[in-house]
Image: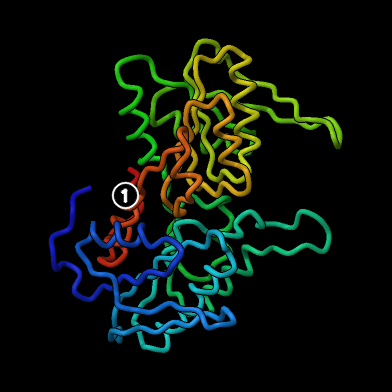
């Protein structure tokens, strides 16, 4: 991924919300584009107020705003910003959402429950987005919830580069899917690394009884890497790491795209057998994440910036992953 010469995107503007300002600044620095001068504030009753201090009429504008914690506040910031840009006559507005919140509510899990991912997709469209750029959606069907173009990037190239740099010089690690639902994701990474795959079959025999984890594959004496898209409470990853070590694994680490890490998740990871948990900066790191000895962030800014560049120039985004 080569850097972009200064002045290539005279008609492109980047606008950052408050959800992950460091990532927005890193994307802007990679593209040699200044962030658009705008105010994203709160009134005394916490209503969101957005004012754009530059002319954006006829411009190609990218709004960088993950909808991570606090999800409702950050989502509302995104919606109000999109509306402001539409009313300011921006030509095309792309919502760059590195972490798409509410993605886990992508189907009815019980009677009389919402499909909130679809609701959020509708809100983003109606607020004024022309297209969406996101990263590692929780499930593929969410792409169909949008009535506007959506580019779903994959964090795998970033993970592959990091894994190769840390496991160079001897037989590669074994990729582990922490549940049956993540097999496709784990298999794709194992294929890129030309290594073996194992699967953890997670079952709960009855309510109130702890999960039984059966490992499909021989992990004895292997460095194992758990792969997932979201880590929230970290319970599944920590339990999986214990099961792998009990099965004779040499070491266990994890690579997860979105580090939600709510509640006492960082503490659980620190107390687990995991050598380290590697997450991307799709969500801004909390103080607990920054201080944790075995949690490390790697940047998706170059990947996101390349995608922004290609969307602006009407080039292929999918070729990033060829």
Q: Name which quarter of the figure residue 45 lies in.
A: bottom right
Instruction: Estimate the x, y position of residue 9 in percent, counting from the top left.
Output: 20, 69
Q: What residue is drawn where x is 29% and y is 75%?
A: 36
Q: In this view, does 178 lie to the left or right of 196?
A: right
* Viewer-proximal residue among 103 and 107: 103
The relative height of residue 64 versus residue 44 in the rendered view (above or below) is above
Instruction: Estimate the x, y position of residue 8 in percent, counting from the top left.
Output: 16, 67
Q: What is the number of callouts on the image?
A: 1
* Viewer-proximal residue among 279 and 161: 279
Q: What residue is drawn where x is 69% and y is 63%?
A: 115
* Viewer-proximal residue among 312 and 171: 171
Label 1's element?
A: helix
Q: In this view, does 4 lie to the left or right of 235?
A: left
What residue sits right under mark 1 in the picture? 319
Q: What residue is drawn where x is 33% and y is 74%?
A: 61
The relative height of residue 69 versus residue 92 in the rendered view (above or below) is above
Instruction: Estimate the x, y position of residue 176 in percent, counting from the top left.
Output: 54, 27
Q: Is residue 72 left or right of residue 25?
A: right
Instruction: Estimate the x, y position of residue 218 in percent, counting from the top left.
Output: 57, 14
Q: In this view, does 116 lie to the left or right of 170?
A: right
Q: Name which quarter of the figure residue 82 lies in.
A: bottom left
The relative height of residue 246 versus residue 55 in the rendered view (above or below) is above
Query: What crowding class fits label 1: few (fewer than 14 Cα within 10 Å), some (14-19), or many (20 or more)?
Result: few
Q: What residue is drawn where x is 62% and y is 43%?
A: 264
- Quadrant in which the C terminus appears: top left
């Amino acid at each position: 991924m080569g850097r972009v010469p200064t002045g290539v995107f005279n008609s492109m503007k980047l606008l950052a919300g408050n959800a992950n300002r460091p990532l927005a600044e890193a994307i802007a620095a990679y593209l040699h584009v200044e962030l658009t001068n705008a105010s994203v504030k709160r009134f005394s009753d916490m209503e969101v107020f957005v004012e754009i201090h530059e002319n954006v009429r006829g411009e190609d504008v990218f709004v960088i705003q993950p909808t991570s914690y606090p999800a409702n506040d950050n989502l509302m910031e995104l919606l109000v910003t999109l509306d402001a840009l539409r009313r300011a006559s921006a030509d095309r507005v792309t919502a760059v959402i590195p972490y798409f919140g509410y993605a886990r509510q992508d189907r009815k899990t019980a009677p009389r429950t919402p499909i909130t991912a679809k609701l959020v997709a509708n809100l983003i469209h109606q607020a004024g987005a022309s297209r969406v750029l996101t990263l590692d959606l929780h499930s593929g069907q969410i792409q169909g919830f949008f009535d506007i173009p959506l580019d779903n990037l994959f964090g795998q190239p970033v993970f592959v580069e990091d894994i190769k740099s840390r496991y160079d010089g001897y037989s590669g690690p074994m990729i582990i899917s922490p549940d049956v639902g993540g097999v496709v994701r784990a298999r794709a990474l194992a294929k890129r690394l030309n290594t073996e795959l194992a699967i953890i079959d997670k079952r709960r025999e009855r309510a109130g009884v702890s999960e039984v984890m059966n490992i499909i594959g021989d992990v004895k004496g292997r460095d194992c890497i758990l792969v997932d898209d979201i880590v929230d409470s970290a319970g599944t990853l920590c339990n999986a790491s214990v099961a792998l070590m009990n099965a004779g694994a040499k070491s266990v680490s994890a690579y997860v795209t979105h580090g939600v890490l709510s509640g006492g998740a960082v503490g659980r990871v620190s107390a687990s057998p995991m050598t380290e948990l590697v997450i991307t900066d799709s969500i801004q790191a909390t103080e607990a994440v920054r201080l944790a000895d075995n949690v490390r962030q790697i940047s998706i800014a170059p990947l996101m910036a390349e995608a922004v560049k290609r969307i602006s120039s009407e080039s292929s985004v999918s070729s990033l992953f060829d």
